[in-house]
Amino acid sequence: MVQIKMPPKPIDNNIGYLELKNNNIYCSKVFLSDLGYSTKNKKISLEFFLSNLIHKDDSNQFRNNYFSFIKSNLDFRQSMLIESKNGKYKEFVCTTNHDDINFNNNKANSKFLFFNKRKYKTNKKVKKSQFYYKETAEMTSTGSWYVDLIKRKSYWDQQTRRILEYPEDYIPSINKSVSYYPKESFELVKKLFVMCYINGESFNTEIKMLTKNNREFWAKVKGKPVFNDKKKIIGVRGIFQDIDETKAKELSLQRTSNIIASQNKRLFNFAHIVSHNLRSHTSNLSLVVELIKATESKEEKIELINTVEDIASSLNDTIEHLNEVVTIQTSTNKSISPIKFSESLKHIKTSIGQIITKNKAMIDSDFSKIDTINYIPAYLESILLNLITNSIKYKHPERDPVIKIRSYIENSKTVLEITDNGIGIDLEKFGGKLFGMYKTFHYNKDAVGIGLFITKNQIEALNGEINVFSEVEKFTTFKITF
Amino acid sequence: MFLVKLKNSQPLKLLFNMNNKLIELACIIDDDDIYTNLVKRVIETKKLCKNLIIFKNGKQSIDYFEALLQNLEDSKIPDIIFIDLNMPIMDGWEFIEQFTKIKNRFNKLITLYIVSSSINPVDIDRAKSLNSIKGYLVKPIVINELEVIFNKSA
């Protein structure tokens, strides 16, 4: 609250007052004439005074002060605007005692409220700026707080209480500050706070806070040290601003930008792949043409023309692979629907049943933590199929393949983990290229080097992530974070 | 064929075969069967060298060279190697790295050329930075230029 400094008190014999006696209020002559009314003492009601005379911004505070005074003899001093007869407001300072007057002798049963006309109009400005301050605080959802390090107390304004969803009479305390933040942000705030009161460093951060109703929201928290005359830090003052809406927009923008960046990266890679893979065929074609031109023998020419057929067919394969990749990029807006891992796995087991039996593969699945995911069903199947067939393809020669599949939640994201007991892969050597196109690392004849590339693209097209862990001769784990 | 000049490339006059000597053994490391068959045909028709060995990836060839070290036989050590970059199991870069470690033990000058369809500047710059690489040839190779290379290396 803004403290209003009193001007030098005008000592004046004509003092306006209200006399409070047996639930009645009497208005003094001087007070009435100050307001432009006739000069007889007059009985008025509290309601009338509150709703018709006193300015609405001041009436609540006055009511509180009034009852505390009546019931508990709590003295107060309040400045306020009171409407005079001509409709203009005049400033008064209301006090419960007066240096010059002692009525107690003759009016023992009465209590008095004195109203001194303010000679200086400073209050008006303060009132006005207080109005703007309140308005600004409310419209920007900014609350202020102060922590008194000497008294070890903390203070909030009403706006802070409102932001944090605490009742208006809630008294904050330093000890309870842990409940104003989620765990992870509390540690950070504590650090900033300590740095502030030890080193005098101001802070300004965006952090998650916790309301009384346990609702998390993003807040801007600013703080700065408060010094005494001897330049010693005696407190920390600052603001909380509710920036949840802005932050949500910022985060969604950040997400969009990440998606664009990753799509751009994929497109760039794709351009390289296209250029490289198509070039290798076209360069073979030009070489054949050159050879055909150079050779005289008819038989050799015919033989070379046959080579063109081979080139055409491998060019076709490449185009098909590239096509598959393009389809991934363009079909992410395809129907995403809830699908069960168990359902998807069942389909795969049926479609590659022969391979599974032939290789004596054991598939052990556990989807008890989470079984349903919103995804493109075809992708989920393709991902599972690729990883399972990989596990079988690269099984250890000395043992039957065992593939463990489980799903769980990590950082509020669904994770699917597929672990095999196969030959593993030297990640130090091949880790960087594992998901590249046409990269194969084993001597298997049927290794094409397209499966993991497609899998990674499918996962990333839906903003997921795939990671691999492996130990040669022991196991390989693919971890998909959806 | 397109020859990228490297820092240790030789002066032009050496490009011509002065003494009509034939290269004894050339080596091609490339996983593209069609390509290797075509080059083989070129080499045979033009009689560019006496013998040719072909490997399908870096690992195969490194295995060959390591075995050779146990029992050095001059006729089995190639005078010139053409290596592709993009290959399964062990790619060109890895081969070059491993080969550079052992090449001095052969007591023979072995010339190394990269032959790739990659026109990625990253690859070309990387090749330029390696002293062990004589040249970077971008596919498609041109028969005449292949002849020049063989002749100057003989």
Image: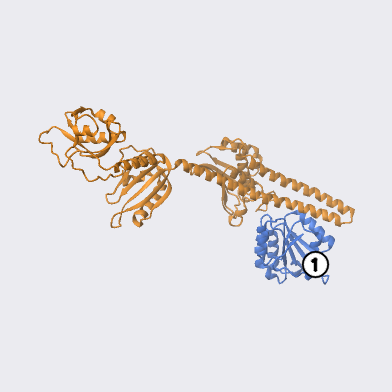
Q: Is residue A152 left or right of residue B85?
A: left
How far from the left and from the top, in percent, is residue B74?
A: 75, 70
Residue B134 image offset from top left, x and y in percent: 71, 66
What color is chain A drawn in? orange
Quadrant of the image occupied by residue B146: bottom right
| Mark 1 surroundings within 10 Å by alpha-carbon count, few (fewer than 14), some (14 through 19), many (20 or more) | many
Q: Return the x and y of residue A218 as percentages of the image width and height.
A: 43, 43
Image height of A99 relative to A432, above or below: above
Q: Is residue A62 left or right of residue A338?
A: left
Residue A72 in view, yes or no: no
Picture quarter with the C terminus of chain A: top right
Which residue in the structure is indicated by mark 1?
Answer: B151
At 86% from the left and 51% from the top, the residue drawn is: A302
Q: Is residue B135 visible?
A: yes
The x, y position of residue A293, in whole percent, is 86, 55
Q: What colour-coding does the image apply?
A: by chain
Residue at left 67%, top 51%?
A: A272
Q: Colour of chain B?
A: blue
- Residue visible at 27% across and 36% down? A90
Q: Nearer the viewer, residue A119 or A61?
A: A119
Tag 1, which secondary structure? helix
Please name the amino acid that badge 1 sits on: Asn
Parent chain of label 1: B
Count of residue discs? 1
A430 left or right, relative to A173: right
In the picture, residue A124 is in which quadrant? Answer: top left
- For the N terminus of chain A, which image quadrant? top left
